[in-house]
Amino acid sequence: MRSRMLLGVAWLAVVLLPGATLAQQVRGVTPTSVRLGVIADLSGPTNETGNPYAEGFKTAVAWVNQQGGVSGRRLELAIEDGKYDVAAEQALFRKFVTLDNVLGGVTYTTGSQIPLFPQYERERFVAIPVSLSEFLVTPLKKWVFSISATYTDQVKVAVDYAVKNTAGRKPRIGVVFPDNPYGHEGRDAARARAKEYGFEVAGEEIMAFNALDATSQVLNLKKANVDYVIMQEVGPTVATFIRDASRLGLETKVIGTFQTVGESLIQLSGKLAEKYYLGVHTFNGWHEEAPGMAKLREATIKITGSDRVRVRSYVQGWATALVFVEAIRLASPNVTPDSLRDAMERIRNLDTGGLTGAISFSPDDHRGGKFVRIFKANADRISFDPVTDWMAPARVR
Amino acid sequence: MPSGDFRTTYREDRAIFATAWTRWMVAGFVILLLCLPVLTGRYVLYIFTLAGVNLIAATGLNILTGNTGQISLGQAGLMAVGAYATAITSTHLAVPFPLMVALSGVVAAAFGLVVAIPSLRLKGLYLALSTIAFQLIVEFAIYRGGQITGGATGLAVPVPALLGVPLDTDGRYYLAVLGAAIGLLAFARNLLRSRVGRAFMAIRDRDIAAEIAGIDVTRYKIVAFAISSFYGGVAGSLLAYHVRYISPENFTLFYSISLLGMVIIGGLGSVLGSVLGTVFMTLLPEAIRLLVGALNEALPVLSVRFALLQDGIFGLSIVLFLLFEPEGLVGGWRSLKTYWRTWPYAY
């Protein structure tokens, strides 16, 4: 009987003691390593952005480790598939902070962010979401940072472009978006910007990411006689739309926001993409002649062994990793969730070497980048060439 | 194990767990579940709490589909009704947690009566279609609900409190859900052994014969829908308090299909089936994820492919299951018990 009691006490000790010791360590940080986490859509409707993003982040981390890590610490990485599912992403976030010992990192969908905001705060998790939603940075969230101009900024620039390029009258603008928070942001931004200029959006159409037919949307917008269609969608959806627009004779210019700019769009649409499409994005492409991009190309080819052209979300993943690296460097040697956050806010004019504009944060402003660029499709090279320089939304007089 | 199983009183005959062995096993299992917060970490508790919520919804669906034979693909819609009833009410009124959960169940039951009406004339695929329509209408209504439902953005849910104790840790909330699940499972088990449960089964097996035998088919179908919807509403309310932020993306048609999958894989018509099916369906994705993660370590070059494999493996396991064990996990469990009991004889 006594031996059984001793066994019971020993079992309890074994079970409880590790928990006690773990609680004293800093989550994700050891003297020789820092662990970051990435939740990306690797198999859901936006996986053509999610997979390159994860690959870019992972390769950047491998490159940094090859160069000796950050201030003497190796970077470790946990990557999980969020499948663009809000519930799955929340569960994975819990896993990161309870099981996987992740210090900070990347989450993915726009829809997950609102439920995650209180959790970032509770768990003291520095997050740079892949989503570029305006509400990530407005109003300010202590633990959330965005390295790029938001979807709202992109839509504003799209409307500005339409206004500038329509002579003698106000442009007739249509908006196409999916029925989720990501889509609604595009719709609301277009409405608000048009109102600032003194006109109304001429047509609004809902189109799911995986829609294979856009006939009704195209016909409605044709009836509304639109000059420009702003699409807050993903690449394949734009390809479907362009195909049906061409088939049904809708003469319009499609301006797609960030998530539409992808090589799959050109592969699906070919020459039609050149004719119809303009994309708004905040990162430069693989072929850009810039020192940071050259380094990215060289390191990517060396580490992965493949010189296949990487898409822009790869560059986004790479740049995000560099931002974390800089913050960890500034926070070293005493890296904790709080010191990482403070270090993030101390980043000023971080030069990514031409991957994107300079990135700056401050305690009052977690919007790292404010500039976008408009690109047009190049079907022969399967790439996007810039049409404008870096620009921010214009001031409407 | 006793060699003979003699019941000498009516009370013994009526007992849910017939032998002392079964009673000890169940008690031990429940004690193990109660000790889980001490034995494991927060992520495991989070998953188990989700499993508990799914279990309540699946049990309700099993009563309707497994026992009464009314196929329903709208259980997630009823969960949404319960969840949104909780979220909307708790932002304006301070209702105690147990009462709020029960009220959400009642609201969902009221909506369930609406779904019950087509069931009185429709069967099989047509009933399934009408429940899908209900599911889609609920989703649509939530998206268009403006300020009331929060539209696509969703609603926040406050932290629940039980007897003055805030249930703000994973461990405490897990215990609350465990208690609710045990209570509702016990109710379901007793319901199915009662007159009402037998009426349900008569309707499932041959409703015309049931009608002729004097069972009020209309009344019992409505009761089945109401009870099943109550379970769905309670599950939705508990889910809302668990994730503390709900949006229409939490309650999709795919979720309804998953719940039906849990019931079918576990075994139609039995409470144990609901338990086994829920545990299997909740833990299988985790197991696959661990497997894929391990494979990622070994073969990182194929990491892109493996993410897509997850869904494939999941679907394949369900299909294999249905091919080789059509009665579900309960059927497999019963076969195992029979084999064990009658070994070395075949019969």
Image: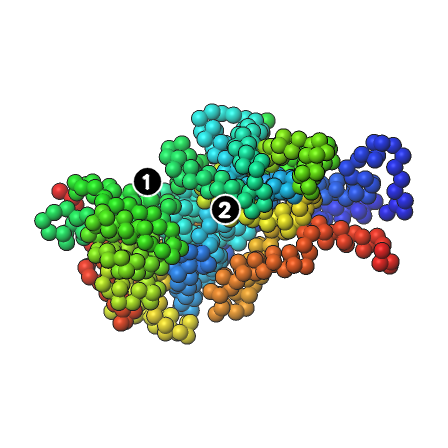
Q: How many marks?
A: 2
Mark 2: secondary structure = helix
Whether residue A93 is visible: no
> Left or right: B92 with respect to A373?
right
Q: Residues within 10 Å of mark 2 (few under 14, many from 20)?
A: many
B347 lies left or right of A263: right
Q: Residues within 10 Å of mark 1 (few under 14, many from 20)?
A: few
Q: Which residue is most to the left?
A: A168
- Nearest the eye: A34 or B104: B104
Quadrant (top left, top right, bottom left, bottom right) of the C terminus of chain A: top left
- Please, what secondary structure does the residue beneath circle 1 have? loop
On the image, numbered disc 1 is attached to which residue?
A139
- Residue B23: % across, % down: 78, 40
Displayed quadrant of residue B165 = top right
Judging depth in this view, the residue of A126 and A68 nearest the camera is: A126
Subunit ID for the residue under disc 1:
A
Say which residue appears at 72% left-offset and 36% top-offset. B198
Pick whichever, B68 or A210, lies toward us.
Answer: B68
Q: In the displayed structure, does residue A290 sit left or right of residue A73?
A: left
Q: Are marks 2 and 1 on the same chain?
A: no
- Snapshot colouring: rainbow
Q: Amino acid at mark 2?
A: Leu
Asked whether the viewer can see residue B338, the reply is yes
Residue with the mark numbered 2: B253
Q: Amino acid at mark 1?
A: Pro
Q: Residue at x 87, y 32 (%)?
A: B9
Q: How far is the residue under mark 2 from the one under mark 1?
A: 34 Å
